[in-house]
Image: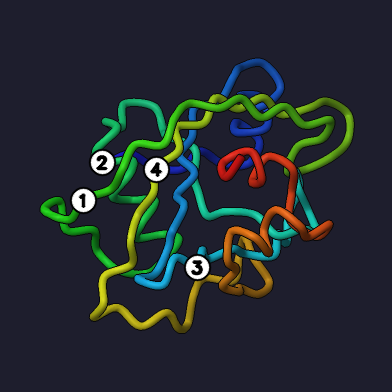
């Protein structure tokens, strides 16, 4: 199992490296997507997809599974299908700690249908202060949804 870096080390990685991450476009059987209202920078105070940076020595499969566990609170069943949605680049002027330098992500996006038996409740509140379901038309028309999220649906 890989571990999360202490904040003092993580900020140096953000300062000096491009981060590889997953964004997970979680959708239900009705085609609505789950978004979180970002509590932290970058992209603070705006609706965004769920996701996570991949850690050093973490395989893509393990990183995806951890991301589902961390963001949705259930263990990812490898037999479930996610759909690769593309590679994107997100560049921000700030980072999680300050505005002294930016954050640069290469994002591997996946669509993931929430299993019917999973009830979305008690979602983690460390990255997002609230959650909502939106249809694609709402995502594209809202000025409260980040432009990087809208790119997934254009």
- Which circle, 4 or 2, is nearer the viewer? 4
Q: CA distance from mark 4 to mark 2?
A: 14 Å
Residue at the spot 59% in from the left edge and 59% down from the top edge: 136
Q: Which residue is mark 4?
A: 110
* Quadrant location, the N terminus: top left
Q: CA distance from mark 1 to mark 3?
A: 17 Å
Mark 3: secondary structure: loop
First of labels 1, 3 by sequence position = 3
Mark 4: give few (<14), some (14-19) or many (20+) Cα within 10 Å. Answer: many
Please name which of the two marks, 2 or 1, marks the residue nearer to the observer.
Answer: 1
Question: Total marks drawn?
Answer: 4
Q: Is residue 23 left or right of residue 148?
A: left
User: Which is more toward the observer, 8 or 77?
Assistant: 77
1 or 3: mark nearer the eye = 3
- Residue denoted by label 3: 32
Labelled pair 1, 4 in contact (Cβ < 8 Å): no
Q: Earlier in the sequence, mark 2 or mark 1?
A: 2
Q: Earlier in the sequence, mark 4 or mark 2?
A: 2
- 123 is higher (above) or lower (below) than 36: below
Which colouring convention does the figure follow?
Answer: rainbow
**SS type, badge 1:** loop
Q: Is residue 110 above or below residue 121?
A: above
Q: Quadrant of residue 11?
A: top right
Residue 12, image x and y in percent? 66, 25
Task: Give the mark nearer the N terminus: 3 vs 2.
Answer: 3
Q: Which residue is mark 2?
A: 62
Pointer 2 local density, CA inside 10 Å: few below 14, some 14–19, many at least 20: some
Q: Which label's residue is closer to the chain start, 4 or 3?
A: 3
Q: The C terminus appears in which quarter of the rendering? A: top right
Compare marks 1 and 4 and give the one earlier in the sequence: 1
Per the image, the residue denoted by label 1 is 81
């Amino acid at each position: 199992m890989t571990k999360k870096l202490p904040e003092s080390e993580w900020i140096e990685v953000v300062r000096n490296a491009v981060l590889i991450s997953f964004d997970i476009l979680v959708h239900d059987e009705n085609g609505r997507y789950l978004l979180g209202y970002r509590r932290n920078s970058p992209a603070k105070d705006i609706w965004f997809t769920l996701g996570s940076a991949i850690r050093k020595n973490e395989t893509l499969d393990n990183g995806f599974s951890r991301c589902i566990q961390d963001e949705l609170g259930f263990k990812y069943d490898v037999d479930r299908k996610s759909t690769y949605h593309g590679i994107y680049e997100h560049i921000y002027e700030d980072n999680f700690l300050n505005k002294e330098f930016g954050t640069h992500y290469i994002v591997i996006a996946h669509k993931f249908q929430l299993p019917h038996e999973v009830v979305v409740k008690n979602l983690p509140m460390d990255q997002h202060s609230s959650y909502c379901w939106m249809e694609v038309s709402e995502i594209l028309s809202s000025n409260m949804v980040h432009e990087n999220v809208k790119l997934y649906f254009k």
